[in-house]
Amino acid sequence: MFSIGLGLFLFQYVNNKDAGTDRMKEIAGWIQEGSRAFIKTEYKYLGIFVAVMTVALSAFLGVKIGITYVFGTVLSALAGVIGLEIAVKANVRTANAARKGGLSAAFPIAFRGGAVMGLMVVGLALAGISIVYWITGDPDILLGMSIGASTLTLFMKAGGGIFTKTADIAADLVGKIELGIPEDDPRNPAVIADNVGDNVGDCAGSGADLFDSYIAAIMAAMILGASSQIPYLVTLPLVFAGLGIIASIIGILLVRVGKEGADPGKSLNMGTYTTTLVFGVLTYAVTMYLGYDIKIWYANIAGLLAGIVIGMTSDYYTSINRSPAIKTAEASQTGAAISILTGFSYGLISCFPALLGIGIGAAISFSLYGVYGIGIAAVGMLSIAGIIIAGDAYGPIGDNAKGIAEMAELGDDIVDITDEIDAAGNTTKAITKGFAIGAAGLTALALLASFQEIVMSITGEPIVFNLMNPLVMMGIFIGMSIPVIFSAMIILGVSKNAFRMIEEIRRQFREIPGLIEGTGKPDYNSCINIATVGALQELLPLIVFSIVSTLVLGFVGGIHALGGYLSGAIFSGFFLAILMANAGGLWDNAKKYVESGNFGGKGSDAHKAAVIGDTVGDPFKDTAGPSLNTLVTVMSQIASLFAPLIVVYALLG
Amino acid sequence: MFSIGLGLFLFQYVNNKDAGTDRMKEIAGWIQEGSRAFIKTEYKYLGIFVAVMTVALSAFLGVKIGITYVFGTVLSALAGVIGLEIAVKANVRTANAARKGGLSAAFPIAFRGGAVMGLMVVGLALAGISIVYWITGDPDILLGMSIGASTLTLFMKAGGGIFTKTADIAADLVGKIELGIPEDDPRNPAVIADNVGDNVGDCAGSGADLFDSYIAAIMAAMILGASSQIPYLVTLPLVFAGLGIIASIIGILLVRVGKEGADPGKSLNMGTYTTTLVFGVLTYAVTMYLGYDIKIWYANIAGLLAGIVIGMTSDYYTSINRSPAIKTAEASQTGAAISILTGFSYGLISCFPALLGIGIGAAISFSLYGVYGIGIAAVGMLSIAGIIIAGDAYGPIGDNAKGIAEMAELGDDIVDITDEIDAAGNTTKAITKGFAIGAAGLTALALLASFQEIVMSITGEPIVFNLMNPLVMMGIFIGMSIPVIFSAMIILGVSKNAFRMIEEIRRQFREIPGLIEGTGKPDYNSCINIATVGALQELLPLIVFSIVSTLVLGFVGGIHALGGYLSGAIFSGFFLAILMANAGGLWDNAKKYVESGNFGGKGSDAHKAAVIGDTVGDPFKDTAGPSLNTLVTVMSQIASLFAPLIVVYALLG
């Protein structure tokens, strides 16, 4: 509650700042309008999906699940709307503050804009869980709410991901390549869609992503706690999550840039480290004070450390001034193919510390406190979600501020300041992205454990997922293929959707008189609409496929096959998520390294090669990669929800 | 024995054909000389490696294992040498027969050259196993021989893969791009290395690859049979393998092209299908006659069918006239990035039927006859290795024949005939490659089962690899990372090695007078030497790493962690092998589709984009992808060999 209150206060703080010149207000207005158009269209379609799901869940699993499902979707939708609203207000105000007061004035607005998102998301999530648990007293009912949040997140994250890359690719291909007009040129009908894409993909999408993992982790830990006969284990996750919010608030308030020339990236990271430390201290104090088992605290810390390892790995493998990015940039001199191979190879290598981190982290937390240990490790990682989301949402605000500064022609000095704010966002993003994937990986393991607990509580018998059981083995192989197909189809969806939008851009340049000369006004909204509807068209069959294949496998192969299937999806999903996020970030920064004057600089052959690598990486890191967590979460929860029916009606097993 | 005899007879048949003009003999001589130089250098280094391994194995596991280890390496080395020798004889004779008697004269020479390799490999393998088993009567001792074959194969396959792509990339970058001289131009010092690469990578490598899976599958099934108390289960794999050789011989003898204009590709596939059918009938008859359990025969057929599904999937996703390749070619019109993304996506999708096939195939064969069912399914798939290898080895012979025809300037008509022979090889290759990966996947599962049996026979207790056991889960995550790192490092190794060779080519053009004018003679062997030594330098640390990490994980984490680790390696290894083979083949054929006049044809922007895709795919399909099977096999066998020590001395578990 306090978190929501502070969130609203910071919202007012940002909203009261001046939005700048009329031209700036006009451009920001377009972005705001476009974002709202996206949300409106998306939520219209989602309304139908949610209605169908609610009816189906209510029919098969009871009205309680149906109601909590709707509640979960509403909360998730709310989190998305709030994130977008604050982002489109903060971006222009950041640009204006840079114009008036320089970096030290602009930075807090951008960051506090992100903080609104962070605080509101964790506040809403924790309040939602507490209310449902307070009313029902049954952690299993939380599954309905959690899957409501997850399905909506999958639409926002993956749909936003398709949207943003559609706009990006289409705007570049027609604008830069066919017509030779600069990036972020207001004459290009896709340019507002491109800016809207940053908001819906990165800002609303990432917020919803962590929102979903956050709820799922707390719920899984509560379910595991409920089966343990120790009463405090059920509420402990809520307590730890609450402490995480307090730690995040402290961290957020500490983030500031004192004087001109200070590095905003360092300041952001300081905030994250402070939060982690405060969280560790607070949970230790409460553990001692309330007499919790100290082993639970250790498991909690094991999760936190695993998250930091994965985040730092991502940072190393994607940073612009580290060897992988520089070597990839260097390889660009011998052409695009070698550049792509080099970046892809480093992406593969970057999976090693992450796989090691999650494997050892899970093993340690399990050996400390059984499956509940895994649950609490996931909660531990996600408890500091408040500041992680704040840092994540800061990125697109800075990016947009730069775009507005360029489009409104505020001059090079101002663009440079917004550029610095933007660059800091890129560094933070790598760390938070790694952190989010790691957290989702542990959450998925906790969900697998809670699936097992739910099955055991139904049958009353212990269940073992033996690797040498043919059904388990078959389940693993089939489960592995779901994230693989999902990422392939979603990448193909981006190309298909981009072609639709390219047609529309060409049509506008052909039919709107004076557009290329700058006297005609492009129809921004038709581009936004095409990207939105197209994204949903590509996505809907995939989401239905992943839900249906989970149910088919469960009802045909039975519980053992389903356990293997969920494990397989975790294995390939986690691996691909890390690979795509890191390789994509790496190619992006290799390109930036060349652009900053190395190996021939902008316009050289090396630059052309690096741009190809970056374009390959775009849907990796912004569309497919980040959707996989949520996909696996949805699959696990569908399995848990339908476990009672599957136990009874399965064909085999 | 009969197989070896027929192999020798066909060798004579090919050898007695005329090798053509002096110019042809000269060029073929260079290739032959280069191949021998490669083998000589490689085997010199391998001698040291084998000596160290033999001492280590003898010290820890007894002299018997040491001796069989050496025996296995010698057989594997022999198979490699024979494959190379026949390939470098058959290529020039194929080109000459094309010159004299057209397609119907040339085709049998190319195919029978491949058949020599196929028959010798399976003959040597089966004879070797039979001899060791006849002397010792202990299937466990076969592990020594099997791992001998596997380690050598890993060197030949991965080393050959690095070698061939090193030469390919270096020859193209300096020759085509820097100097503008055509492909296969004898002035280019790397051109012979490029042709040698086709032989050592595709021919010797693939032969050794199936040699290794073949031995491992038979051995694993024998070990599983030995633990079953039913005596005939131990020798049954040998019987089925023998029947497979007979079926292969029948299939090989049926492959011929009756008249001009017939399609050699169809003829090759007919041979494979006939062999499969004959094998099914023969094993059924023997099962009935000897009173074997009919369920074993069903398991055998399940394996065969899984192999065919995987092979046909590979065929569909890589064929030049199918939708994936055409769509990837079409995407090349919008640039290299979209082309790569499209091909990569189809590569991911192609994993679905393969994962489904191996998952369901393993489950069915297991439910028919337990772990032995999986073993016999693998044997079933590999029994027709004779004709599979023949088809595989046919490819580089045709490729080389075309190269010789071009270099010796035999005229367009002759080049067209060799081109047809070459093209048929590409189709067959996709099927056989998919088949080989599928067979290796089932073999790996059988090895995992035999690892479990070995552990149980040591401890006398049942062992369960429970997914929710933290050590197993940790093992899976760590095991998954080994093939991931291996493929990344090997791809990076290709680039590094290519740079060494580029320096050498530039040096020769700088220092050898008259080289570019065609009057000076390039030093082909120094290029071959650099590629060979460089390949081994890149590879040796990786192989040591994979062996050491298996031992470290086993001795630290214990048997449960090791079981998880091997499973994890199978999961990621199988997935990456399929992905890389199919995506690589797809990009290759998308390029060929553009080259045959579509979307702008040769020299267009689409072609340039498709070439980039093809270059990315080259180390995927020819270096990293095909090595992963063998890597997993080596890891599994090391684990089985050291199981007795790990059970006693492990730190955890």
Image (cartoon, coloured by chain):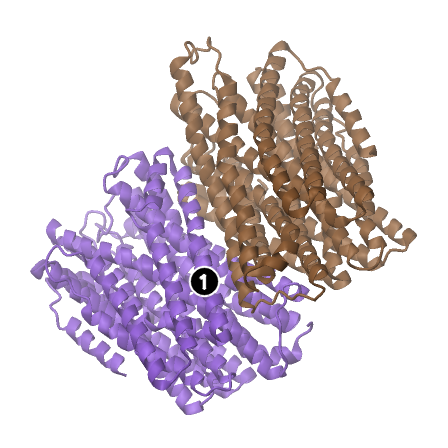
Chain colours: A brown, B purple
Picture coordinates of residue B489, whole percent (x, y): 49, 57
Name, please, the residue furthest toward the left.
Answer: B100
Query: In which quadrant is the C terminus of chain A drawn?
Result: bottom right
Is A253 on the left-hand or right-hand side of A198? right
| Chain ID of residue with mark 1 | B
Residue B195's place in the image compared with A409, above or below, is below
- Residue B163 visible in the shown view: no
Is A475 on the left-hand or right-hand side of A6? left
Residue B649's place in the image compared with B339, above or below, is below
- Residue B355 visible in the shown view: yes
Query: In which quadrant is the N terminus of chain A drawn?
Result: top right
- Which residue is depicted at the point 48% across and 19% down? A189
Picture coordinates of residue A115, whole percent (x, y): 73, 31
Read off the residue under disc 1.
Answer: B358
- A220 or B429: nearer the eye? A220
Picture coordinates of residue B604, whole percent (x, y): 28, 35
- A66 or A228: nearer the eye? A66
Picture coordinates of residue A362, whole percent (x, y): 69, 58
Name, please, the residue furthest toward the right.
Answer: A289
Name, please, the residue furthest toward the front.
Answer: A59
- Which residue is depicted at the point 22% across and 68% down? B113
- A192 or B500: nearer the eye? A192
Binning the other alpha carbons within 10 Å of mark 1 as few (below 14), some (14 to 19) or many (20 upward) gives many
Inspect the image, locate mark 1, and give the three-letter code of the amino acid beneath it.
Answer: Ile
| Helix, strand or loop for disc 1 | helix
Q: Residue A453 lies in what quarter of the image?
A: bottom right
